[in-house]
Image: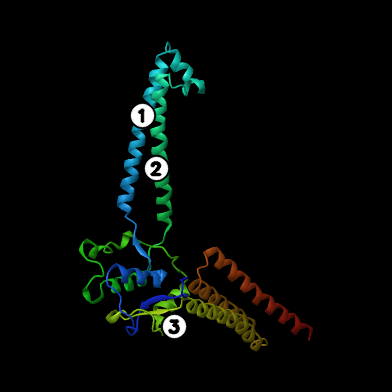
């Protein structure tokens, strides 16, 4: 997550000392969100949006019926030469002296404006629906800060602005990497940033930590497990090279299961990707054992 100052994230933990007073309410709330993009949590008003689309849809449906009725009347009135020509020739349709065509154009202008509004609303709604909900831990920290010391940051009706958690969206991309989530949940305190300029959260025990630290730690842990599972398996197979074949096969099965478990737990790999990676890993170990057997036979 990027901000104007640096990459940070917030969680519950150690409070920072209060350095600079800010006007409580919208000013402090805006600073809190600007300080960390993970705090960019807002209502999407899904009920109002759905209702707005339904109203627009009904308005267009009514306009569609009016247009159908006009076409039906023109189709029955075969003796109305102006209407018949306007249905085939643009010059007649756009002629301001053609009364019937004027009715069509007025209705079409109304339809054009309404359908544009309707389609724009649908496209915007589709983009809103694509946004992710905030993670439970981030939302918990957000609401703890908003209701600091049981005094909401905003008063009046806005005291209950974030009560409906199903109607909240996070504007910042939500990191769903399993290893990163694990590190943030249980070891977020370890990555905290001791920055005196971070605004105090008082008794809410809010602290910030750079998100890049979590990503770096996750990458290092992934590299460590990858190296251990490959090098460790090769070393173990070398140590039992002269042992019974059943033991070597059992060792291959053990390391293959461990590899599949690690890939499935600490990565977001899909099932097909897990199967493919596990098969490739097992193939490497089988080839290694086969070459070792051939070398032993030659010796």
Q: Check disc 3 and report the residue beneath it.
A: 191
Tags 1 and 3 touching, CB below 8 Å = no
Q: Which x, y percent locates residue 116?
A: 42, 41
The residues bearing labels 1 and 3 have C-alpha atoms spaced at a distance of 63 Å
Q: Is residue 56 above or below residue 20?
A: above
Mark 1 or 3 closer to N-term? 1
Q: Quadrant of the C terminus?
A: bottom right
Q: Is residue 10 above or below residue 69?
A: below
Quarter of the view holding residue 140: bottom left
Circle on res. 65? 1
Crowding near pointer 1: few (<14 within 10 Å), some, many (20+)? few
Q: Check disc 2 and report the residue beneath it.
A: 117
Crowding near pointer 3: few (<14 within 10 Å), some, many (20+)? some
Secondary structure, mark 1, is helix
Observer-nearest residue: 241 or 162?
Answer: 162
Q: Which x, y percent locates residue 104?
A: 41, 25
Secondary structure, mark 3, is helix
Residue at 40 percent of width and 15 percent of height = 76
The residues bearing labels 2 and 3 have C-alpha atoms spaced at a distance of 48 Å
């Amino acid at each position: 997550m990027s901000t104007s100052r640096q990459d940070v994230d917030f969680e519950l933990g150690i409070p920072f000392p209060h350095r600079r007073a800010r006007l409580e309410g919208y000013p402090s709330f805006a600073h809190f969100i600007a300080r960390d993009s993970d705090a960019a949590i807002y209502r999407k008003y899904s009920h109002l949006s759905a209702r707005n689309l339904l109203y627009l849809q009904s308005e267009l449906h009514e306009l569609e019926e009016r247009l159908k009725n006009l076409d039906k009347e023109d189709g029955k009135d075969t003796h109305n030469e102006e209407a018949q020509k306007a249905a085939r020739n643009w010059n007649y349709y756009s002629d301001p002296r053609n009364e019937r065509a004027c009715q069509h154009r007025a209705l079409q202008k109304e339809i054009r404006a309404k359908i544009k509004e309707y389609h724009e609303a649908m496209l915007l709604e589709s983009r809103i629906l694509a946004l992710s909900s905030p993670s439970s831990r981030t939302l918990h920290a957000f609401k703890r800060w908003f209701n600091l010391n049981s005094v909401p940051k905003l008063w009046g009706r806005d005291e209950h602005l974030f009560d409906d958690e199903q109607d909240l969206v996070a504007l910042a991309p939500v990191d769903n990497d399993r290893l990163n989530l694990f590190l943030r949940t249980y070891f977020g305190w370890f990555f905290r940033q001791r920055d005196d300029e971070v605004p105090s959260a008082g008794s809410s025990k809010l602290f910030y930590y750079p998100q890049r630290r979590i990503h770096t730690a996750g990458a290092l842990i992934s590299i460590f497990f990858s190296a251990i599972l490959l090098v460790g398996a090769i070393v173990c197979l070398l140590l039992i090279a002269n042992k019974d074949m059943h033991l070597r096969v059992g060792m291959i099965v053990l390391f293959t299961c461990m590899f599949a478990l690690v890939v499935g737990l600490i990565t977001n790999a899909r099932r097909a990707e897990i199967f493919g990676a596990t098969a490739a890993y097992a193939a490497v170990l089988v080839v290694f054992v086969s070459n070792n057997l051939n070398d032993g036979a030659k010796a």
